């Protein structure tokens, strides 16, 4: 999707809904539930086998995904607020939990993500933070953006997980 097609129009998840997806180890979609399909605006056929980042919104800092991939490849779960881009140019925010899927020998065979409707106050906090991180990425680097986030969390005296989860409560 070209940036000229992106609309500044938000669609919102309903409370109690869950978006579920699974990917292979390369991040290609292997499963999407109906809510994922409906929110993204793509058909199941258009989604399966495609990189999960087909719905990545340009307002998302690359550093968030770098952190996400680091954590799940270490078999740690991660929570994150993610702004997704629908096929029609609208966007939607989610509160995501991402984990590695493991086989019987503890090898990563894919990734599993469940998303719910984020708290309004969370997006009010996260959106300007992400804007700052994107500016740093554009002027410096993804690593500088991640360092900025880590310094911010250190100044607040909280871990990434504590900060993210506290925004939802």
Image: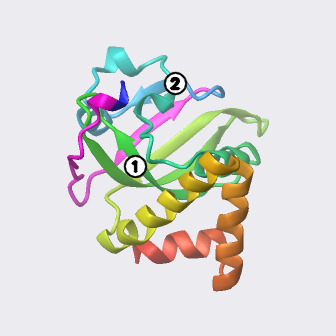
Compared to residue 152, the image places residue 91 above or below, namely above
The residue singled out by tag 2 in the image is: 51
Helix, strand or loop at disc 1?
strand
Residue 7's quadrant in the figure? Answer: top left
Q: Nearer the viewer, residue 153 or 32?
A: 153
* Residue 5 in the image, given as x and y percentages of width and height: 27, 29
Left or right: 167 in relation to 4: right
What type of secondary structure mainly makes up the magenta span? loop
The question of residue 138 being in magenta is answered with: no
Left or right: 18 in relation to 63: left
Looking at the figure, which quarter contains the N terminus? top left
The question of residue 17 being in magenta is answered with: yes
Left or right: 81 in relation to 4: right
Q: Nearer the viewer, residue 45 or 155?
A: 155
The residue singled out by tag 1 in the image is: 83
Helix, strand or loop at disc 2?
loop
* Residue 39 in the image, given as x and y percentages of width and height: 26, 38
Q: Residue at x 68, y 83 (%)?
A: 155
Q: How far apart are the two marked residues, 2 and 1, measured between alpha carbons? A: 16 Å
Q: Residue at x 49, y 25 (%)?
A: 29
Q: Residue at x 30, y 69 (%)?
A: 120
């Amino acid at each position: 999707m070209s940036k000229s097609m992106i609309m500044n129009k938000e669609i919102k998840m309903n409370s109690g809904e869950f978006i579920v997806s699974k990917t292979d180890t390369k991040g290609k979609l292997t499963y999407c539930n109906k809510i994922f399909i409906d929110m993204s605006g793509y058909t199941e056929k258009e989604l399966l086998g495609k990189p999960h980042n087909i719905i990545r919104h340009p307002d998302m800092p690359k550093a968030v995904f770098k952190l996400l991939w680091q954590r799940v490849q270490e078999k740690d779960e991660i929570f994150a607020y993610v702004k997704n881009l629908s096929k029609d140019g609208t966007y939607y925010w989610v509160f995501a939990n991402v984990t590695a899927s493991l086989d019987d020998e503890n090898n990563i065979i894919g990734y599993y993500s469940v998303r719910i409707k984020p708290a309004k106050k969370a997006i009010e906090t996260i959106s300007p933070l992400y804007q700052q991180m994107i500016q740093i990425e554009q002027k410096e680097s993804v690593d500088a953006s991640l360092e900025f986030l880590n310094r911010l969390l250190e100044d607040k005296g909280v871990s990434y997980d504590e900060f993210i989860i506290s925004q939802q409560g």
